Structure formats: structure tokens, C-alpha cells
Image: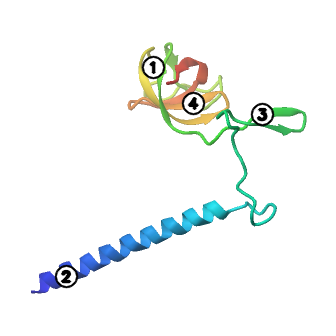
């Protein structure tokens, strides 16, 4: 008899948590649709971050213009040539430990980016390599 009461309470708790999650999702969706980022009137839409063609828009900052890209997304890459992974994203950095050599053709996970460098994880070792040493999908 007690186990039936416990199962009933857990069922009610699961239903309440599901309903709460759906409510929070709807509330966040509504807030995102009506958000104006504090600019203009309440009827203004959100700021456009990319052009209609899907290309990143150019943002002028002083004399230089840079392409605005989104945040880095980890992805799979394949080594174009033999590489020695480094501890830091600079050419004079010491090699990664315990293994730094990665032969051409090995796939790895690019888990971070810094300038022209990727932090690669090969499942055996982790280290930095230049972007031009990898093939991207």
C-alpha cells in the first residue's frame, strides 16, 4: 500500500516538473520574440546578425573591418599533414605531452579556437595546431 502512495506522489511530481519546464520554455520563447535589446520602440524587432544570404555581416571598427562570426562550435577535423601539437597557441611553444606527433589523415575534435590556432583533441593527446594544418568538413 505504501509503495502505491510513493509511486503516485512521484507521478504527480513528474507531471508538475514537466508542466513547469513547458511553462518556462514558453516564457523564454515569448521573451525572445519580444526582446528589442533596449533599442527603439517596443515594436522594433531583434537586431539582425546575418545577411539574408547567410554570410556574416561586416562590422566596421575604426579603420579595420572584421567579419562577425558566431561563437566557436566544436567540430571534427582531419589532419592535412603530419603535425606536432603544441602546449600553447604560439609557434615557439613546447610540444604537448605525453604525445605530440599526429600523422596526416587522423581525425580529431577541434574543441577551441584562438586566432589562427585550434585546440585539438585526438583522444590520445590534446594540443594546439594551426588551422591550415587541418581539413574542415
Which residue in the protein does label 3 denote? 66
Image coordinates of residue 62 in percent, x first then y, are 89, 38
Q: Residue furthest right?
A: 63
Which residue in the protein does label 1 denote? 102
- Viewed as shown, does residue 74 lie left or right of 70? left
Circle 3 residues within 10 Å: few <14, some 14–19, many ≥20: few
Circle 1 residues within 10 Å: few <14, some 14–19, many ≥20: some
Considering only order in the chain, which callout, 2 or 1, is on the residue closer to the N terminus? 2
Residue drawn at the location 59% of the way across and 39% of the way down:
72
As displayed, is residue 27 above or below residue 2?
above
Which residue in the protein does label 2 denote? 6
Circle 4 residues within 10 Å: few <14, some 14–19, many ≥20: many
Image coordinates of residue 123 in percent, x first then y, are 38, 32
Q: Are marks 2 and 4 in contact (CB under 8 Å)?
A: no
Considering only order in the chain, which callout, 3 or 1, is on the residue closer to the N terminus? 3
Which residue in the protein does label 4 denote? 118
Amino acid at each position: 500500500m505504501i509503495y502505491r502512495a510513493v509511486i503516485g506522489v512521484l507521478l504527480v511530481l513528474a507531471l508538475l516538473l514537466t508542466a513547469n519546464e513547458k511553462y518556462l520554455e514558453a516564457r523564454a520563447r515569448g521573451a525572445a520574440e519580444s526582446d528589442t535589446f533596449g533599442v527603439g520602440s517596443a515594436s522594433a524587432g531583434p537586431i539582425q546578425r546575418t545577411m539574408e544570404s547567410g554570410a556574416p555581416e561586416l562590422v566596421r571598427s575604426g579603420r579595420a573591418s572584421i567579419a562577425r562570426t558566431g561563437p566557436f562550435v566544436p567540430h571534427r577535423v582531419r589532419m592535412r599533414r603530419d603535425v606536432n601539437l603544441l602546449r600553447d597557441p604560439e609557434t615557439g611553444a613546447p610540444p604537448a605531452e605525453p604525445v605530440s606527433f599526429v600523422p596526416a589523415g587522423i581525425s580529431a575534435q577541434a574543441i577551441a579556437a584562438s586566432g589562427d590556432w585550434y585546440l585539438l583533441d585526438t583522444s590520445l593527446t590534446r594540443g594546439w595546431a594551426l588551422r591550415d594544418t587541418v581539413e574542415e568538413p
